Image (cartoon, rainbow, N blue to C red):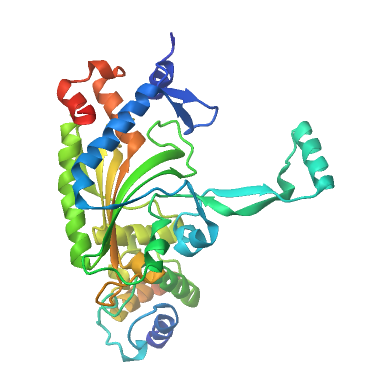
Amino acid sequence: MNETLRRILAQHGKLAVDAASLGETDDLYAAGLTSFATVQLMLAIEDAFDIEIPDRLLNRRTFASLAALESCVAGLVGEKEPA
Amino acid sequence: MCTACNTFLDRLIDRGLLIETGVDGLYGRSGAFESVIDGFDAAISRIGGGDGAEVIRFPPGMNRALFEKSGYLKSFPNLAGTIHAFGGDDAAHAGLVERLAKGEDWTQHQALTDVVLAPAACYPLYPVVAKRGPLPPQGRLFDLNSYCFRHEPSKDPARLQMFRMREYVRVGTPEQVTEFRQTWLDRGQALVGSLGLPFHLDVANDPFFGRAGRLLANNQRDQRLKFELLVPIDSEEKPTACLSFNYHQDHFGALWGIRTSGEETAHTACVGFGMERVALALFKHHGLETARWPDDVRRALWG
């Protein structure tokens, strides 16, 4: 999942730094992530993991770091798959 | 006399302050209504006129290519108004006239023109500023006023489809533009207070479209980028934004390539005055007859 998220970040994040060099908890906004780029990220992540991020998670915290994104995606993928 | 004047809109129309056109949100305005708009416009100038803003008046239509680049369609596709014109030949014209007579769809040969309706007074400004090259060290300040269009027909008289927006727009360093916004947050409250209107300030978001829009709206609120000065007009529960104070960060600066004198990407901020909304708020709270408005309100408007 981490690799996929890094690839999506590199493709859609329009960051000022190399997505491969990002630490798990590095602040993506500080790395240059803009509001409009988060929209592209959201669409690409939903597409890649076949999920729909619910309204309650459509906020800055969800997109704040790789770790935050992983936790969001893991939760939604988990909800999707029957235990 | 109107026998069923239930709503504020009904009373405004009955009194002749607004003139119906048959389309919700599209009204003519009487002389009395316009004198209030003029008075408020002058009151704004009395406060901001000494700041040395460059006055520019754009027409209510803007260059479509620049509008497309502005990103407005990413965020507000449902509100945009595009202008089309007939592009057919004689035969197509004959067909148009025939379909029109039959009450059928006649728009087959209507094609996009190079003009769209301005959605906000400041949209045509940013490319003009970028074209002038790097900003001077003190940045720039503009005074704008334009008819704007937003496709949102409503019976709420404070939600017009075509309305005037006066704006001051600051372009400069983050420090310069955030100081500008704070100054106008203070000035705006003093101004509306001098008009005897009840109001409060609140963090706000633009009406971004769709699911992506909810993310953008939440981001905007989280960062406290937009404040609105709200006055109850059509309803107490949902007061109307009469002034707005917006910090765009480097959104327009990066989009249009506006640079500061230090070769950084410029930041921008604006204060917007909803001219009709303020006039409507005054009619709502002080009555439909301006001659009976409190003296201090009349003085604040007309000196």
Q: Name which quarter of the figure residue B254 lies in.
A: bottom left
Residue at the extreme right of the image, as rendered: B91
Name the residue rendered at 31%, 91% in the picture. Answer: A21
Q: Locate residue B81, reporting x and y percent.
A: 53, 48
> Is residue B241 in sight in this rendering?
yes
> Is residue B279 in sight in this rendering?
no
Report the front residue among B158 and B165. B165
Q: Locate residue B267, reporting x and y percent.
A: 28, 66
Name the residue rendered at 24%, 40% in the picture. Answer: B44
Name the residue rendered at 49%, 61% in the picture. Answer: B66
Q: Name which quarter of the figure residue B270 lies in.
A: bottom left
Q: Locate residue A22, reporting x and y percent.
A: 30, 87
Above or below: residue A71 compared with residue B93:
below
Q: Quadrant of the C terminus of chain B?
A: top left
Q: Quadrant of the N terminus of chain B?
A: top left
Report the front residue among A61 and B222. B222
Name the residue rendered at 43%, 13% in the picture. Answer: B4
Report the front residue among B250 and B85. B85
Residue at the extreme bottom of the image, as rendered: A21
Report the front residue among A28 and B161. B161
Task: Name the side, left or right, on which B163 lies relative to B68.
Answer: left
The number of discs equals 0
Above or below: residue B268 compared with residue B207:
below
Above or below: residue B233 compared with residue A54:
above
Q: Locate residue B183, reporting x and y percent.
A: 16, 52
